Image (cartoon, rainbow, N blue to C red):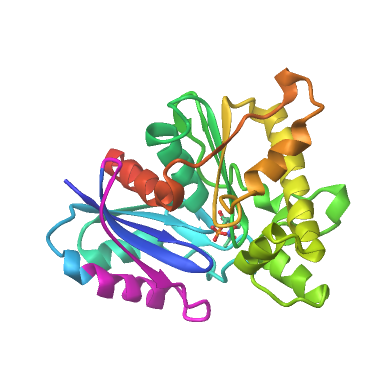
Amino acid sequence: GATLAIDIGGTKTLAALVRGAQVLAETTIATSREAGPDAWLAAIAKQARHWAGRYERVGIAATGLIDEGRWSALNPATLAIPDHYPLPARASELFGKSAFAVNDAQAAAWGEHRFGAGNNEDTVFLTISTGIGGGVVVNGRPLLGLAGHFGLLRGPTHGQSPLEDVVSGRWMAAEAARAGHPAEAPEIFQKAREGAGWAEAIVAQSASRVALLCRDIQMMFAPKRIVIGGGIGLASGYLQAVGAQFAGLPPHLAPRLVAASLGPHAGIIGAADLAARHR
Ligand code: BMX
């Protein structure tokens, strides 16, 4: 049977009907940042009314920490989720089906591992998006809870800021404004492709920080592949800019980067499969 799969991100929410790796129907709604989780779920329920009777369970991938059925923000700048919100329980009440919830990047890591670029081998997934999300699959199992939240790493180069605050889409837009060219990430990429120096510099700095992260991940998990997704990660030219930083590395230390092959569907496909396994 099919799963109602939902991916709640810092900027937008994707709701879909998913069977296996097949997306049967989908719809995107803006995540109204101020509204809060009850309103986010209500907006999804309104869309999902068209699919009533067509799904057996609910699988949710969400930005933030999901631990033992409770949902909280780690970086409230990505999305201000109230502490310990009982996401699967509320979803289950609302949709009248059993519901399972997992972090968005962990869901995507699982989706890519099972059905996408991860090829059923050890996979680390990184989404470069509003924030930076991470998910780790080792020995055929996804690490859940706090594990893999690489966007929250703090390194000596960026002081007290979480890594994602000096890399992600929000950071790029803030940098552009500081450079006197207010623009959102898609436009910054466009300007960089057209050769605007200020835009090239922003993309290059973000990419070089992600490259350092990938080198560290290689030391920690030595995954077969690091799968990159997210609106920034999949923007044309970004993956190449990250990979270029590994040029001088001995081959056994160089991470192997691949683009997420499920694209924006990785999270919903992974969440649906995890929900189907969770009984
Ligand atoms: C943040 C954190 C992660 C999430 C990542 C990507 C919050 C609210 N989110 O690091 O849980 O995986 O952002 O999220 O603390 P996205 O919304 O950018 O996809």
Decide if residue 68 is in sight here.
no
User: How many numbered discs sit on the rendered protein?
Assistant: 0
Please identify the quarter of the rendering in which residue 140 is found: top left
Ligand 1 image-quadrant field: bottom right
Q: Position of residue 189 (x, y in %)?
A: 65, 61
For this rendering, which residue is in front, 85 or 165? 165
Question: Residue 222 in magenta?
Answer: no
Please identify the quarter of the rendering in which residue 173 is found: bottom right
In the rendered image, the vertical position of residue 214 relative to residue 275, given as above or below: above
For this rendering, which residue is in front, 42 or 259? 259
| Residue in the image at 51% along x and 59% along y | 63
In the rendered image, the vertical position of residue 267 relative to residue 130, given as above or below: above
Question: Residue 31 in magenta?
Answer: yes
Answer left or right for 155 relative to 193: right
Answer left or right for 7 relative to 57: right
Decide if residue 100 is in sight here.
yes
For this rendering, which residue is in front, 199 or 56? 199
| Residue in the image at 46% along x and 45% along y | 108
Q: Where is residue 37 in the image (x, y as percent from the top left)?
A: 43, 72
Single out the residue that lies furthest toward the left. Answer: 53
Which region is colored magenta? 20-48
* Quadrant location of the C terminus in the rendered image: top left
In the rendered image, the vertical position of residue 82 relative to residue 113, given as above or below: below
| Residue in the image at 26% along x and 40% along y | 20
| Residue in the image at 71% along x and 44% along y | 241
Single out the residue that lies furthest toward the front. Answer: 194
Q: Where is residue 243 in the image (x, y as percent from the top left)?
A: 70, 37
Q: Position of residue 50 (x, y in %)?
A: 18, 69
In the rendered image, the vertical position of residue 230 relative to residue 33, given as above or below: above
